[in-house]
Image (spheres, helix red, strand yellow):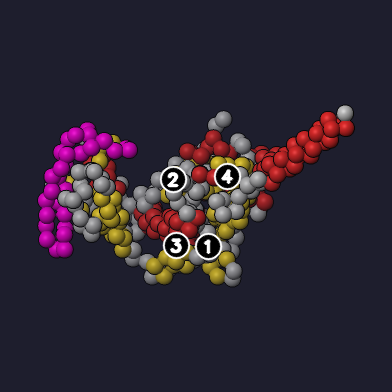
């Protein structure tokens, strides 16, 4: 009998010990929590977030156009235990996410950080292009080959550094002024992808000052026909825009950067004194794309005084999950024009704001 009791006691100790160890065992999940907000028409650490040189620039003392962030805990080098994850899961303002959403397999945390820095830099360039186009200020966007995709038709035929001059004899427009719907790489991608996969396409290239014509058969790509060319516009702006947001990375502030740049270049405040926040990527053509983390970003925005929140139409499904949903006026936008129109409605009080539908 004593032996059986001892065996039971030892088993219970082992069970409790194993359970306790399990609670502390690091797991491959992340916790997303509300992060910082940065007013793009204000200052960060005593310096303007956006400065513009080469044109008349304005500063407006009232209102805000804030970008918002998500703060992530966890990752391959700092994994969280079960207890921490359960606590976050029960929180109305946090979310538990699979680690691979932020740290794809095969990529180190350093590579992820570098990628986010590149995305931030690209978003600032695209935001500048979109803002200038919206204001009708011309700039040049020359489509230059950044790389080719192995096993695709362009690989070994088109070279890095080639400038794409024409597609099937149709000259690629390179001066954006707000009148041309597509310029530079956007025009090239549209003209190639709009055909049926398998149809041939001829590209006219400028290769170190020499004109080269290449013809190839298109293949099926992610968005229609493709030849496997990665293009990066070489942009030449008539103004110099500098955006300083510290070590924040990623592309999700693009829309708010564009609005901030426009506010700097416009004599009248875009907000009319309203506190507006938002999140969404932007292309040089002014298309606003969805991103993740909207529920936490809305909490950040409301915590720091926002009354309105601009969200990409693609992200509408996320807004209803936010603890701040009932405290913010959430506005759905698809293009920079939509965002500007929404700000005019907010500023004047005239018209209806487009909203997400459940």
Which residue has dot 3 on it?
265
Kindly check if marks 1 and 4 are in contact, taking CB atoms under 8 A apart as contact. Answer: no
Dot 3 or dot 1: first in sequence order is 1
The image position of residue 340, as x and y in percent, is 47, 49
Q: For the magenta stretch, what is the residue range? A: 196-223
Q: Quick check: can you spot residue 138?
A: yes
Q: Choose mark 1 or mark 2, whichever is in front.
A: 1
Q: Compute the Cα span from label 3 to label 4.
A: 45 Å
The alpha-carbon separation of the residues under discs 1 and 2 comes to 23 Å
Vertical comparison of 17 with 179: above or below: above
Q: Which is closer to the viewer, label 3 or label 1? A: 1
At x 34%, y 59%, the residue is 137
Q: Which residue is mark 1?
A: 247
Question: Whole-percent x and y of residue 135?
Answer: 39, 56
The numbered mark, 1 or 2, whose residue comes first in the sequence reads: 1
Residues at marks 4 and 2, CA–CA distance in whole angstroms: 31 Å
Sequence-first tag of 4 and 2: 4
Quarter of the image with the N terminus in it: top right
Q: Nearer the viewer, mark 1 or mark 4?
A: 4
Quarter residue 218 falls in: top left
Determine whether, in the image, residue 163 is placed left or right of residue 50: left
Residue at image coords 29%, 38%: 221
Position above or below: 148 against 331: below
Residue placed under numbered mark 2 in the picture = 288
* Callout 3 crowding tier (Cα within 10 Å): few <14, some 14–19, many ≥20: many
- Of mark 2 and mark 3, the one earlier in the sequence is 3
Circle 4: element type: loop
Q: Which residue is mark 4?
A: 28
């Amino acid at each position: 009998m004593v032996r059986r009791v001892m065996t039971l006691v030892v088993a219970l100790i082992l069970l409790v010990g194993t359970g306790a160890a399990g609670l502390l065992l690091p797991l491959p999940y992340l916790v997303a929590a509300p992060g910082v907000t940065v007013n793009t028409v204000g200052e960060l650490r005593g310096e303007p977030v956006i400065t513009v040189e080469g044109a008349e620039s304005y500063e407006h003392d009232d209102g805000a156009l804030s970008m918002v962030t998500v703060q992530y805990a966890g990752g391959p080098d700092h994994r969280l235990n079960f207890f921490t994850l359960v606590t976050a899961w029960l929180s109305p303002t946090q979310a538990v996410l699979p680690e691979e959403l932020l740290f794809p397999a095969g990529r180190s945390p350093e590579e992820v950080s570098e990628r986010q820095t590149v995305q931030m830099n690209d978003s600032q360039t695209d935001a500048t292009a979109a803002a200038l186009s919206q204001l009708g200020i011309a700039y040049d966007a020359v489509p230059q080959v950044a790389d080719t995709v192995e096993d695709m038709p362009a690989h070994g035929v088109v070279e890095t550094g080639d400038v794409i001059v024409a597609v099937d004899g149709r000259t690629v427009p390179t001066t954006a002024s707000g009148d041309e719907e597509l310029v530079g790489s956007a025009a090239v991608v549209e003209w190639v992808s709009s055909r049926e996969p398998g149809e041939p396409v001829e590209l006219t290239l400028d290769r170190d000052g020499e004109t080269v014509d290449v013809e190839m058969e298109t293949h099926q790509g992610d968005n229609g026909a493709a030849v496997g060319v990665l293009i990066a516009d070489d942009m030449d702006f008539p103004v110099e825009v500098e955006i300083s947001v510290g070590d924040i990375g990623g592309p999700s502030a693009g829309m708010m950067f564009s609005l901030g740049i426009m506010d700097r270049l416009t004599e009248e405040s875009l907000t009319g004194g309203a506190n507006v926040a938002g999140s969404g990527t932007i292309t040089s053509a002014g298309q606003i794309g969805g991103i993740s983390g909207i529920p936490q970003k809305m909490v950040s925005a409301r915590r720091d005084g926002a009354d309105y929140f601009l969200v990409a139409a693609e992200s509408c499904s996320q807004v209803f999950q936010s603890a701040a949903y009932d405290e913010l006026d959430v506005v759905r936008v698809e293009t920079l024009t939509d965002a500007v129109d929404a700000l005019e409605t907010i500023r004047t009080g005239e018209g209806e704001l487009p909203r997400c539908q459940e």
